[in-house]
Amino acid sequence: MDNICVIGSGYVGLVTGTCFADLGNNVVTVDIDERKIEGLKNGEMPIYEPGLEELVERNVKAGRLRFTTSYEEGLKDAKFVFICVGTPSAVDGEADLKYVRASAQTIGEKMTHPLIVVNKSTVPVGTGDWTAEIIQSAQETPIDFSVVSCPEFLREGSAIPDFMNPDRNVFGSSNREAAEEVAKLYSPLGAEAVITDIRTSEMIKYASNAFLATRISFINEMSIICERLGADVTEVARGMGFDKRIGPHFLSAGVGYGGSCFPKDVKALANMALTHGMHPQLLNAVMEINDFQRKQIGLKIRELLDNNLEGKVIGLLGLAFKPNTDDIREAPALTVARTLMNQGAIVRAYDPVAMENVAKEMPSIELVEGPYEVAEGADVLVLMTEWNEFKNLNMDRIKGLLKTPILVDGRNIYDPDTMRERGFVYRGVGRGFNGEGVLATTGD
Ligand code: UDX
């Protein structure tokens, strides 16, 4: 059992702190946002994450998890301090590190005993080094500390199981002993530990996310080729995925990747390469394909409505960037909605948990109670986020409610033949074959 202070109580901080508490440690989570901390003290979660509320409640009750706005209180008995603050994109694509800087500065000012400072935020390669410099220069009298990079690989929506069953954990430091101490905290999870230097650790995070984004853009490019040539990209991906060298994951074609990590991290890595005199051709292509994928959906809808969107009602199923989260950061649904509205369409939508966020961010989208309300009188129904509740809808009822039975499946969750048999004009992503040996572009 160790004493841990976590700086930042967003997705990463709150999940990390709560899971460490659940492993038996004493955790204090610090955030400068008073409302957030007040809410957490009253059991209100600042984010939607399955299982989090129960886990927070259990550990608060057991006395292992506390929340505060005071660094002094957080650092008081801590052996480890985890920096889990946000690193949003600055205008030029570079990661904005003001929160990391501020945390390092305050840790340096307030620390009273030796600490192991662990950075979990995704930061440009080299950040660990200057974090140490900031801490050191903020100290009034020199106190021993080490900086360890330990990137997070949690996915929103499955962050708790991801924390508890990691594929690996990465620990990077110039002080191997400190890295090993942090690795010990994770040892009850039984995963592979990669212990390395700090820059390599920081790079592992970027390279992992960039690789996953590349897989998505790869399959999305395949989807465009499939659609034109009359092949079905879902079957192509299945056929590829059995090859052990390829594997089945992250090969779902769709409306492109979104969220708080992939868009930001690919951009930041490309920017790092550029500022060091390199030309990141592949990363640039990955981003370009991802943008194009969103545009494609808009073009498809437009084409299905005889190139005229004026006054047309487009119903969107799902707004979050992926299922099981209320996160709408870089959500493809919002980009598509904006494009359609700019061309005169009325956009109506439903999402199981993201509507509150959308109402604040894009009030021009008409939000309704459920999927059937979305369909009522709509000219096209577009599936944007593959929530489970959209997989078993009464499609006959949906068809009856739509003004014209056009279904655009942005995540390929419906069976094209079944939908066509039911009388829908069906368009998926990269599903050119319509079951009768003709191209979908000439079919229907
Ligand atoms: C990601 C990484 O997976 C995680 O390791 C890192 O710590 C943070 O970034 P997250 O952003 O929560 O996690 O989402 P993820 O589940 O990885 O999906 C990212 C995006 O890719 C979503 O928009 C999703 O819809 C899209 N995606 C994913 C596809 O379009 N196709 C796929 O096959 C997989």
Image (tube, helix red, strand yellow):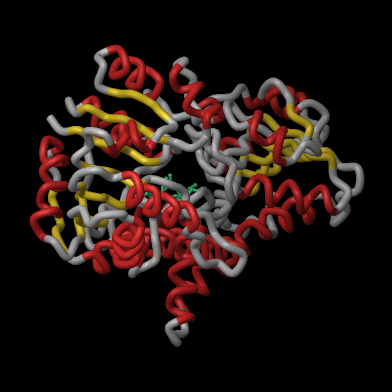
Coordinates of residue 165 in the picture (x, y in percent): 22, 38
* Image spot of residue 27 (x, y percent): 27, 30
Which residue is painted at 49% across and 20% down in the image?
Answer: 44
Of residues 50 and 271, the one drawn nearer to the viewer in this rendering: 271
Residue 41 visible in rendering? yes
Where residue 23 sits: x, y (%)?
18, 28
Outermost right residue: 311
Q: Quadrant of residue 154?
A: top left
Q: Is residue 196 left or right of residue 43?
A: left
**Could you say which is closer to the camera, residue 196 or residue 413?**
196
Q: Residue furthest bottom?
A: 277
What residue occupies the far front of the structure in this picture? 141
Where is 215 relative to 81, above or below? below
Residue displayed at 30% across by 15% down? 58
Q: Position of residue 413 (x, y in %)?
A: 52, 39
Residue farthest toward the top in the current orientation of the protein: 61
Query: Does residue 417 appear anywhere in the picture?
Result: no
Whether residue 269 is situated above or below residue 141 in the rendered picture: below
Residue at image location 25% in from the left, 21% down from the top: 64
Quadrant of the rendering where the N terminus is positioned: top left
